[in-house]
Amino acid sequence: MENISDYNKVKNYSLFKNNLTNRNYFIVFLSLLFLIVSIGFITPILIESKKSDWTNILPQKTDEVATSIETLYKEKEEFLITHLSILSQNIISVNNENLLQTFSNSVSNYNETDFAVGLFDKDENLIGWNNATIFNEKIIWKDFPDENQTFFFHGQLEIYLAVWKQVESHRLFVAIPFEKFYKTGDQHISFRENLEKIIQTDVDVSYLPYSAKSKDGRKYSFDIMNNNQTKIGLITFIKPILNAELNELRDTINHIQSLLILIAFLVLVKILHSDVIKLENKWLRVVLFILNILGLRVLLFVLGLPSKFISFSLTDPTYFSSAFGYGIVKSPIELFITSLAFVIISIRILREIVDYFHNEKSRIIRSFIAYPLVGLLTILYFLVIRAFSAASKSVVFDSTLNFFENTEIIQSYVHFFMLTNLLTFSLFFTIVLISILIVILKLININHKIVFSKLIVILLFCFTLLSYLFYAVQKESLISFSLYASTALLTIAIVYLAISRKYNFKNTILLSSIIASILSISFINYFNAEIEKRALKTTSHSIHRTNHGYLTFMIQEALMSASNDEIIINSILSKNPNYNSLAFLAWNKSSFINENLNVKFFLLNKQKQVLGKFNQGNDFALEIPDLLKAYLPKGIKIFDLSNDEKQSNILAGINPIVERSSLLGYFVIMIDTDKLISFRNPGLQSVKPQNYIASLNHNILMVENGNTKFFSPNFYPTDEVTKMLLNANQTEQENWTEFSLRGEDYIGYISSVDINNVTKKILVAMKSKELSWSLFNFFKLLIPQFSLIAFFFVLINLKDLRKLTTHIYSFKIQILMSLLIVSIIPIIALAAYNRYNVTQKSEFLINESLSEKTDLLINHLTIQKKNNPLRQNQITFEKAAKELGISFRIYKDNASIFSTETQLVESSLISKYLPMGVYVNFSQNGFNEYFTTTVINGINHYTFYKKFSINDEIFIAEMNDAFNIIKATLAPIEIDVFLFGVYSFAILLIILMSTFLANKISSPLKKLTEATNAVAQGDLSVEIQNTEKGEIKALINGFNKMTSELSKYQKDISEIERELAWKDMAKQVAHEVKNPLTPMKLMVQQLIASYNDKTKPFDTIFEKVTSTLLNQIETLNQIASEFSQFARMPNYTLEKFDLIRVLNEYVLLNPNLTFEIVNNTSYSSFLINSDISQFRRMITNLIRNSIQAESTLLIITISQSDKFVELLFTDNGVGIEPEHLSQVFSLNFSTKKKGMGIGL
């Protein structure tokens, strides 16, 4: 009764404490609700206060914005001055003889796109430079302020923040770009645009010192002051608006309320949690758990968390956005939160489904219900695969990120985060597929007791067949049959491992993550191939799109934009405009930049003389026709200049450039619609968008009325390919074809169009991906995802870090690491050697090829001059370029005097100067030829330089692989792709094989170790299943024989000891019993004699005899009590010990039984009061019962009920027959032949 009273006290105290905790949480919840409501009442008061005090707040807000802008400018200015000081110190520390060499070494670290560095002598001549285009025009020093004062330098295409310094007898000039008027690829440099992003309002920046402040009261202007407090520019921005400030205040209050609502929701969940865990219905608890997670996700979405609170790349929908779920995945961070929520839910459901599968008490479902459920679940399974593929497709098509656009493993943290998102939602779909399969197996196995391995084989065969059927019945399948079948194969494999318990639940999730990564990358690769195919189709349509109406619209749009562009107009009005650069700007800002058309932009003066020009495509010979020169347009005028006799198809447009009613000149655009672009110009690649650069890899073949009209360089189609194009059936909606050309495989898209009785057929093709590229793309995504999986797996196992650390030193791990080190190090060394070797050979071949072209050029120039001594150098160079068909540049001293890519130099897209390092090598180090890598608009290229002379004039010829196609070479990128892809695959195979071998070698020893530990604990029933061969087999047989003999000896000794003990006990008991029996016998005999004699007083004797008998009987009773006391179990010895630690001892002691300890509490350990010896004996007996019931799996579930701990033992043994369930706890009941019925 005392124990019961203590239990009630403990239980009542626990209930009181829980109620007190819930009461505290409830008070917090009510306080949060009060705050939320109170803030709602306070908000109008704050708004009215801000309205009334706005006249005082506005100047303060305006000053804050101006100060933040000034701080940003000062940071750039300080950065510039710091580097000026560093460079000047380098120059001061050397003498004049080594000046250029030192300067060359210094500026080699400065990228020309970020810095412009120049060194001038006392006569203002440029003697040192980097490759910045700012030096293409002459530097006019009289326009500059004094030294060490920053100023804005106006280049042709950029505005720089510059500074110069007198360094002894030289002038050092350093500048950084502030505004770039054109876009370079997909990047743009603009101080003004950066300011607009930061302060979230319109900003106007004038880089002229005489700019006047705005008189518009809605705007605020302040001067840009340099480090000498001299005005060098003006910044104007729109003042903060009251409505905008009020909206910002409301947003801030909404954010606070949102956070309070979120906290209140979490507190409410905590309050309800204690009641939820008490629910007996497990599936009801699961449903409530799912509702909590979904409720939290929906609440975050409704409140706009975190997107409305923080703004950075991961919340930017331009990287990824989908309309799914009303925008619940509208940005990368939203996709991650949604995916994570579904992963948490799926893992919880999988856990319950696995337990349900192993639960023998689960209710049997009748066949007429089970079969339809299996069918519905099978359909659901393939619909989930389709949903999986649709989600993967969304990542590719709804994202501006391209995972395969370059060879970097991690392109940016946004790419890495999207890879994380891809892995997360892929894991969700994988777990859902696994869960469906387990339920299907449960339904089948309930009604048919099929061997599990056979059932898996049958399931695999059926689902492979169903994969094909599901793929075939779809009108437009998102993925291929092979991907459907692979998904089924991999998910079924995980199910087999999870159900057979070769892996515990954590390892099952780990394996599921790996499979999810493999599947997701396979899907992404597949859809990336679809994008590349779609690009072929887009290129084909863009070629057909060049009809008269569309081109007319493009010309009108481009002329209107160029003629009204403020930058172009201001440049025309400046002192020394570069008209070629202005023509380039007009092209760069037009829609022609996205087209594959031959187009020329002309800038004319008032007399319609050409001032500047820029062309895209082949340098076709187009001059301004007399028709355009004679026409006096008042607006845009389009001319069709097609000539059937000359077989030309020219479209032209003209528009005057007018500023304040004053004619400045004309813009003219001319298009040769009869030709397609057939060049790969790196100068234009750098200023074109990525989709154009990708289209340069497309090969085009065009035929008109059966005759070949055009084909791309280096494509050279055979007659078979041309016939294939001519015979193509254009009635089909999608006309795709695959063909081989000179040993290389191609995939192509064929299209046809009829214009003016002319049938044009176009084939747009690209090379099929080689195996090395496929492997590279696969491992490029796999390695980051595997790293992520490994990180999270270690993270969730931190509490078991000590056990993991111990496991690292296991025999298996040591063997594995040894095998990996021995295998991988040679592979890596071989890869490094091959890369170095192939790179050297490739560079050697490029060097040889460029050297041969240079020698050919020099010989051609020499022969020309020899045959025509009076021919001007410019004409000689032009003739060589035309006749040889190669691109080159000629330098005299340090500057270019001729270039086949003239417009790139004249437009200031590339520097006209010889690279500084090359110049120093030729002028001071005695080089006559030099092979190196140079950067052209951010792209690395191999370049060969050679000094030569003609008629005693010294020149330097430049030949590079940027403008010349070098055949029979392996580019460095192709080397890296091959080595990375192939060797990564080889390393993966090595890891898998090493793991298999390490497991094969260590598995028998592990079993022996576990069995030995079990024997050490006294379990002699251990027997190792022996499937090994050789010495290991003999060792295991010897161990099994040893344990068998020990068990036999133990039984024999026990029987002997038991027999001896019983004999001694029997003698003792017999002796003790005999002692009272003798007097009892004598007393009875005396009583009988007295009764027969009748002489002595019988009553006295009877009383005496009976008293003696009673005493002796009491003695016998005492003897029986003492015997009972001897046979009784020892008394309990209570002590505190860790329940989890004791249970973990049994995990390694029974090698034939798979243990899993499931902790359903929030505690990692439990200290309980019990007799540890009796407790271990109880656990041992329960485990032995499980083994005797033919179990291979035992799950021990730990739950908490108030202050008590509950242990639930679940195994997959044969179980107990239903008719015996009611008797299992009855004394002396046993189903075993030698059982005593007292264990349970």
Image (tube, rainbow, N blue to C red):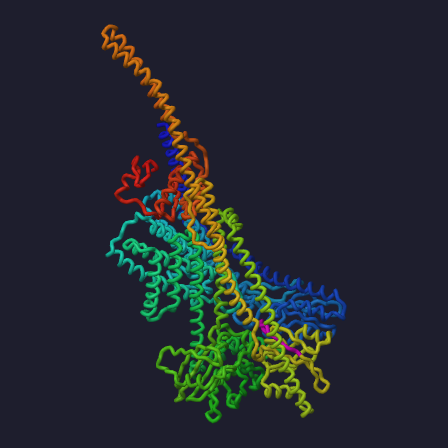
Residue pushed farthest bottom?
A: 645
Judged left or right of residue 131, residue 166 is right
- Between 982 and 50, the one nearer to me in the picture: 982
- Residue 86 against residue 799 in the figure, above or below: below
Q: Residue at x 45, y 42 (%)?
A: 1015
The quadrant of the rendering that contains the C terminus is top left
Judged left or right of residue 451, residue 213 is right
Residue 484's quadrant in the figure? bottom left
Judged left or right of residue 357, residue 881 is right
Q: Position of residue 299 (x, y in %)?
A: 39, 53
Residue 1187's quadrant in the figure? top left
Main SS, magenta region, reads: strand
Q: Residue at x 69, y 70 (%)?
A: 104
Q: Position of residue 1200 (x, y in %)?
A: 39, 41
- Residue 1158 against residue 969 in the figure, above or below: above
Magenta stretch contains residue 239: no
The quadrant of the rendering that contains the N terminus is top left
Q: How many marks?
A: 0
Which range is magenta?
936-945
- Residue 1133 against residue 788 in the figure, above or below: above
